[in-house]
Amino acid sequence: MPAKKKSSRSGKAESKVHTVMKEHKEGSLRSGSGKKVKSRKQAVAIALSEARESGAKIPKKKKSR
């Protein structure tokens, strides 16, 4: 049986992502400028940045070439 891969995010980050994605699904999530967030990727980015602000340990975004 293969070993379970450990998540790179903390529990605080997981819960933050969960709550923000729920807001996104309900249609109540807004970006910094006040506009409604329409894409899933943008919602996840907002969730991770909020989690970083609250002190969760999240790895930095990988740079694309």
Image (cartoon, rainbow, N blue to C red):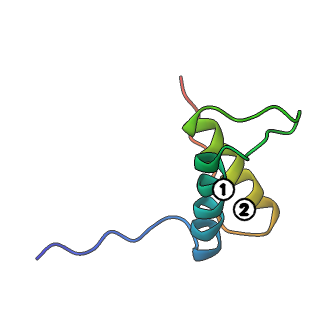
Q: Is residue 52 above or below residue 35?
A: below
Residue at the image position 73 percent from the left and 46 percent from the top? 29
Secondary element type, mark 1: helix
What residue occupies the far right of the structure in this picture?
Answer: 33
Query: Residue 20 in the image: x percent, y percent?
Result: 66, 56
Residue picked out by circle 2: 51
Secondary element type, mark 2: helix
19 vs 7, nearest the viewer: 19
Residue at the image position 63 percent from the left and 66 percent from the top? 13
Query: Residue 61 in the image: x percent, y percent?
Result: 61, 44
Query: Residue 3 in the image: x percent, y percent?
Result: 22, 75
Amino acid found under the numbered disc labelled 1: Val
Residue at the image position 73 percent from the left and 47 percent from the top? 28
What residue occupies the far top of the structure in this picture?
Answer: 65
Q: Nearer the viewer, mark 2 or mark 1?
A: 1
Mark sitting on residue 20: 1
Amino acid found under the numbered disc labelled 2: Ala
What residue occupies the far front of the structure in this picture?
Answer: 26
Q: Answer left or right for 28 relative to 13.
A: right
Residue at the image position 66 percent from the left and 64 percent from the top? 16
